[in-house]
Amino acid sequence: MVYKIVRYGNPVLERAAEKVTNFNTPELRQLIEDMFETMYHAKGVGLAAPQIGLSLHLTVIDTQIDGEGAPKPIVLINPEIIRKDGKQTGEEGCLSIPGFREQVTRAMVATVRAQDESGQWFETTGDDLLARAFQHEIDHLNGILFISHVSALKRDLIKRRIKKLMKAGEWE
Ligand code: NI
């Protein structure tokens, strides 16, 4: 099932999500499957549960979507970044803020500690685009959007343009 993606302006995107406490359930498996379906349908490389209106510490990522390699789906439950190294600056967007892309500086390498569908803890390290996705998606779980990482001037400009789109009924 493809969920509708919640857009900037919905408060669920700007509050810290709840931790996941029930593992190994059919509901959790279904939710993960549906989040991947929603993400692939929207041609995104990551999707966090708050983006479908669910305030849960759960995100799905697949940065191979545009690559030649096989899909590499990653599920992160209750994740946190435990190590960051280096810096990268590049264009970033968000399925909840469509039409807006900005340069964002992130760590070049990020190591995440998270639980899988059965509640097992694991660690995974990514660099480049995958590291960027880890940081962007885990930000979502803490109620932080990528526009928090751009200058106040650019952020205000984006907010004003979104308000205009809202008034015109072109942002829902
Ligand atoms: Ni996003």
Image (cartoon, rainbow, N blue to C red):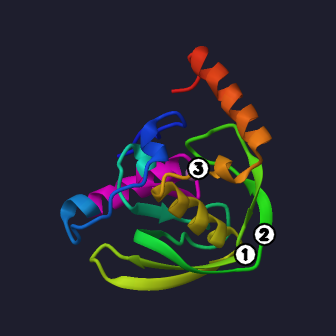
In percent of the image, x 20 and y 63: which residue is there?
26
Disc nearer the start of the sequence (1/3): 1
Query: Residue 19, located in which quarter of the rendered image?
Result: bottom left
Q: Is residue 58 left or right of residue 151?
A: left
Disc nearer the start of the sequence (2/3): 2
Q: CA distance from mark 1 to mark 3?
A: 19 Å
Q: Tell me if mark 3 has few (under 14), some (14-19) or many (20+) residues whose alpha carbon lies within 10 angstroms of its own.
A: many
Q: Position of residue 54 (x, y in %)?
A: 35, 48
Give the residue type that dot 1 points to.
Met
Q: Are marks 2 and 3 in contact (CB under 8 Å)?
A: no
Give the residue type that dot 3 points to.
Leu
Q: Is residue 115 left or right of residue 91?
A: left
Query: Mark 2 sits on what residue?
Result: 88
Q: CA distance from mark 2 to mark 1?
A: 5 Å
> Does the beta carbon at disc 2 come under 8 Å from ligand 1?
no
Q: Is residue 59 left or right of residue 81?
A: left
Q: Position of residue 52 (x, y in %)?
A: 41, 45
Q: Are marks 2 and 1 in contact (CB under 8 Å)?
A: yes
Q: Position of residue 10 (x, y in %)?
A: 46, 35
Query: Which is more foreground, mark 1 or mark 3?
Result: 3
Query: Mark 3 sits on what residue?
Result: 145
Disc nearer the start of the sequence (2/1): 2
Check disc 2 and report its element: helix, strand or loop. Answer: strand
What residue range appears in magenta?
29-49
